[in-house]
Image (tube, rainbow, N blue to C red):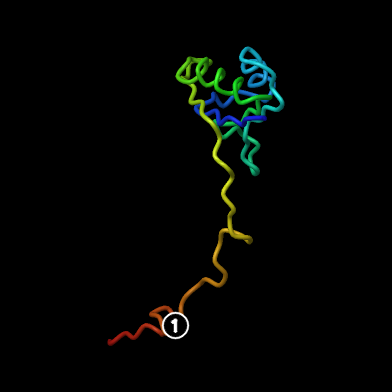
Amino acid sequence: MEAKLYVGNLPYTTVDADLENLFAQAGTVKSAQVIRDRASGRSKGFGFVEMSSAEEAQSAITMFHGKDFSGRPLTVNLARPREERPAGGGFRSGGGRKPGGNGDRERRRDY
């Protein structure tokens, strides 16, 4: 049984290979991924490591949670299942002024 770990508080310079090399000390790493921002490509400061067994995952939590990694204390725990998000963009359609609002009337000036 494989176990996926959440690894937080990573330095922004961390790459996938750094994460894999670190967690290899606790057992067999199936995958290691630092999560990056889609637009900028910059690290978001967290990632996921998949270990080959639940025992190795627990060993990694014990070894690395709270431990210093490049000057930052790591947060390591079991990853929660990914929550389903509604399809579509994050923006509401429409926009602009509402009909009948102050922006639709001419401003009256009494001279």
Identified at 37% across, 82% down, the residue is: 107
Quadrant in the rendering for residue 108: bottom left
Please determine whether, in this image, residue 18 is positioned above or below residue 5: above
Q: Name the residue nearer the viewer: 66 or 39.
A: 66
On the image, the x and y values in percent for residue 61 come to: 52, 21
Q: Is residue 77 above or below residue 56?
A: below
The answer to whether 14 appears left or right of 74 in the picture is: right
- Dot 1 alpha-carbon crowd within 10 angstroms: few under 14, some 14 to 19, many 20 or more: few
Image height check: is 78 above or below 94?
above
Residue at 48% across / 26% down in the picture? Answer: 75
Check disc 1 and report the residue beneath it. Answer: 104
Residue ID at (67%, 27%): 32
Position of residue 10 measured from the top left corner of the image (x, y, whole percent): 54, 25
Rendered-image quadrant of the C terminus: bottom left
Q: Tell me where residue 76 appears, x and y as whole percent.
A: 51, 26
Location of residue 3 by image quarter = top right
Spot the residue most to the right: 30
Q: Nearer the viewer, residue 84 or 104?
A: 84
Q: Residue at x 48, y 20 (%)?
A: 65
Across and down, in percent, residue 90 comes to 56, 58
Q: How many marks?
A: 1
In-image side of 2 versus 64 (left or right) = right
Quarter that holds the N terminus: top right
- What amino acid is at disc 1? Asp
Which secondary structure lies at badge 1? helix
Residue furthest out toward the left: 111
